[in-house]
Image (cartoon, rainbow, N blue to C red):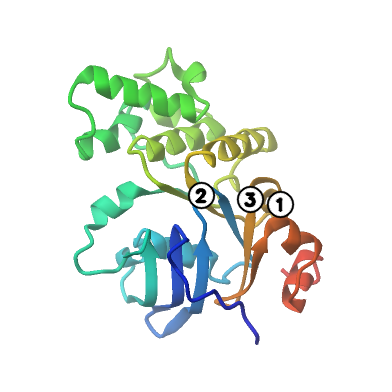
């Protein structure tokens, strides 16, 4: 199968993958993926279930390290630095690369403590007033401040599903990441909550680089500027979102976009 080939120049990309393979024991989940993620844009990863989208996402913040028997080969850089280098502090890497999961997963703590957790861990605030400011700014950026300002000491788990997901986004941005990974962040939400999260993604993309895995092609078309189509562990096609959806170059992309398989 002919697959997408990225250019040799990795310097302009926020994240650059070259020939990345991922193995879970004997099973190969990614087969030589090469892909550039440009800065301050939203890149959507689309494709059928089990095609390697989430596996690739987990490579960027080394979440695959937590899976027994997982092995990653190839080159993956963040601002030109090797993500898998022996000198890389994984805790610091995950501060630079925030993650929002498929199902909202607030900590069993207060709304305030959910957002304050990362800044406390990384020593980002030198006083309570500074921490308060980080928490409130993060909640404001996540579009949640007005909804929770009188409930800061109530548990985050008491919020609605959509509010919980925005709380998780506030928690991710509280440590001032450069990059936010979102793994199907709206799949457990209703249409109204989904619309709020999509609006938020649009606002955040002005200041952050965002990579979103989505099973919804409509969502990819709405929120992203760039789209990569994955199939059976390969990247088949990458391009501007409008081009991918209106004029795909590869027959497999065409088949997926038009619903002939999926």
Q: Is residue 58 visible?
A: yes
As measured in the structure, the alpha-carbon distance from the residue carrying label 3 to the one carrying label 2 is 9 Å
For label 1, the SS is helix
Indicate which disc, 3 or 2, sits on the residue closer to the N terminus. Answer: 2
For label 3, the SS is loop
Q: Quadrant of residue 150?
A: top left
- Do the residues under discs 1 and 3 have CB atoms within 8 angstroms? yes
Identify the disc placed on residue 224: 3
Eyeballing the image, is 112 above or below 69?
Answer: above
As measured in the structure, the alpha-carbon distance from the residue carrying label 1 to the one carrying label 3 is 6 Å
- Left or right, 258 with respect to 47, comes to right
Q: Is residue 261 visible?
A: no
The N terminus lies in which quarter of the figure?
bottom right
Residue at 25% of width from left, 17% of height from top? Answer: 129
Residue at 80% of width from left, 66% of height from top? Answer: 247
Residue 124 drawn at (x, y percent): 23, 33
Residue 143 drawn at (x, y percent): 53, 26
Identify the disc placed on residue 210: 2
- Left or right, 226 with respect to 124, comes to right
Residue at 67% of width from left, 33% of height from top? Answer: 192
Q: Quadrant of residue 154?
A: top left
The C terminus lies in which quarter of the figure?
bottom right
Eyeballing the image, is 39 above or below 247?
Answer: above
Crowd around label 3: few <14 · some 14–19 · many ≥20 (10 Å) = many
Q: Quadrant of residue 123?
A: top left
Residue occupied by mark 1: 221
């Amino acid at each position: 199968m002919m697959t997408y080939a990225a250019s040799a120049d990795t310097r302009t990309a926020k994240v650059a993958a070259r020939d990345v393979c991922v193995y879970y024991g004997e099973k190969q989940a990614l087969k030589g993926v090469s892909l550039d993620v440009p800065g301050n844009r939203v890149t959507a990863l689309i494709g059928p279930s089990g095609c390697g989208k989430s596996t690739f996402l987990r490579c960027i913040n080394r979440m695959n390290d937590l899976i027994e028997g997982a092995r990653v080969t190839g080159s993956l850089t963040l601002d030109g630095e090797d993500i898998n280098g022996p000198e890389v502090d994984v805790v610091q890497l995950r501060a630079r690369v925030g993650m929002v999961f498929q199902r909202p997963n607030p900590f069993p703590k207060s709304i305030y403590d959910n957002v304050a957790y990362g800044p406390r861990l990384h020593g980002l605030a030198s006083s309570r007033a500074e921490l308060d400011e980080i928490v409130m700014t993060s909640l404001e950026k996540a579009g949640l401040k007005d909804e929770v300002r009188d409930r800061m000491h109530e548990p985050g788990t008491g919020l609605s599903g959509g509010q919980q997901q925005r709380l998780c986004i506030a928690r991710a941005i509280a440590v001032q990441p450069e990059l936010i990974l979102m793994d199907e962040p709206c799949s457990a939400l209703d249409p109204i909550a989904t619309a709020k999260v999509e609006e938020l993604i649009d606002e955040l993309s002005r200041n952050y680089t965002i990579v979103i895995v989505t099973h919804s092609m409509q969502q990819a078309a709405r929120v992203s500027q760039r789209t990569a189509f994955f199939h059976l562990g390969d990247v088949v096609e990458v391009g501007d979102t409008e081009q991918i959806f209106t004029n795909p170059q590869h027959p497999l992309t065409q088949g997926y976009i038009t619903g002939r398989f999926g």
